[in-house]
Amino acid sequence: MARPRRRAAALVLMAAAKRSHPSHTHASPNDYFPRKRIYIHIFCICFESASLVASALRAASRMDGKPRLDPKGYHATPAPRPDTEARWDCTTTKADDDWLEGKAIVAHQTVAGGGLVELKLKVGDDVYLSGAKKGAPAEIGRIVMFFAAPGDGHIWMRTRWFWRPERTEDLPDSLDWHERELFTEEHTKPDDECDENSTAAIELTPVRVLPYDPSQMDLPWPAHTFFTRRKYNKAAKKISDLVPKDAMEVEGTAAAPAAAPAAPAAAPAAKPRRNEQKERLRLLEELVATLQGRIAALELR
């Protein structure tokens, strides 16, 4: 996949050089810009190295085995992770446009050592969707439906969002909220117009959003557990109390706690990894040394 992108980058740079020197329009850019070729190669090598660094970080995040989210759903690490895969866990139906629809899936990822982590999800369950920035929260939504394109195994879903008070804009200064409170998105659209998201963004950490219960407010809250008692209208930037009809819709079908990830499948005992940070640094230093060697070789041509 790197070669087409490398050719495209080279063509863009050469075209720019040609436009900036109209007196040489009949010559090859390589004839009068020998150093341009070096810059083009350096650009391509840097692009390829960036991809290798991203791959190294992704591999490192997989072998850590550390939780990606803290108890409130904020990302504890900025390291990328492999996309979550999903398979149907129900009988699917075919819509009028031949798209498949279903009510349950199994989201899963392969972890270091060959194990498999799974999370069963169904319509009405709550779900974390990953972000990319350390310290930023994973988004929380309630699943409305699952669907897939004809002949495509990739599964998508429609969700309704919950809003975190600390990240909701234009709230009154006088408004007070509980640290585990979420605002329910005000239902201004039918289910078939809800936001569509790829199941690849699912975090394999169960999360629950419960109806408001005053008797529970002073008790310790389990990790990844929230409640809602108010709704948020994004267009009007307005907060209002949930009425009984809203509360019934919020409860949905998610009466039981979300399933916990399955334990990794048995795998051969691996040698304990030590000094992982040093190992990552060594890998990055090797990449830099390789890049410097290639640049030096190109300078000598």
Image: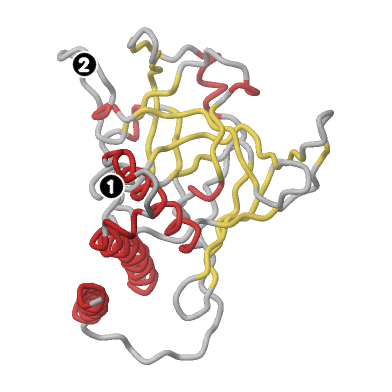
Report the residue at 40% width, 27% height from top.
228
Q: Give the farthest residue toward the top.
A: 236
> For the residue labelled by badge 1, is the local secondary structure a helix, a strand or a loop?
loop
Report the residue at 34% width, 54% height from top.
29
Q: Which residue is more in the foreground, 68 or 37? A: 37
Q: Which residue is mark 2?
A: 175
Amino acid at pointer 2: Leu
Q: Residues within 10 Å of mark 2 (few under 14, many from 20)?
A: few
Q: Are the residues tagged 1 and 2 within 8 Å (C-beta)?
A: no
Q: Which residue is mark 1?
A: 133
Residue 158, compared with residue 201, is above or below; it is above
Front label number (1 vs 2): 1
Residue 237, quarter of the rendered image: top left
In whole angstroms, how far apart are the C-alphas of marks 1 and 2? 27 Å
Residue 81, compared with residue 91, is above or below; it is below
> For the residue labelled by badge 2, is the local secondary structure a helix, a strand or a loop?
loop
Report the residue at 42% width, 29% height from top.
162
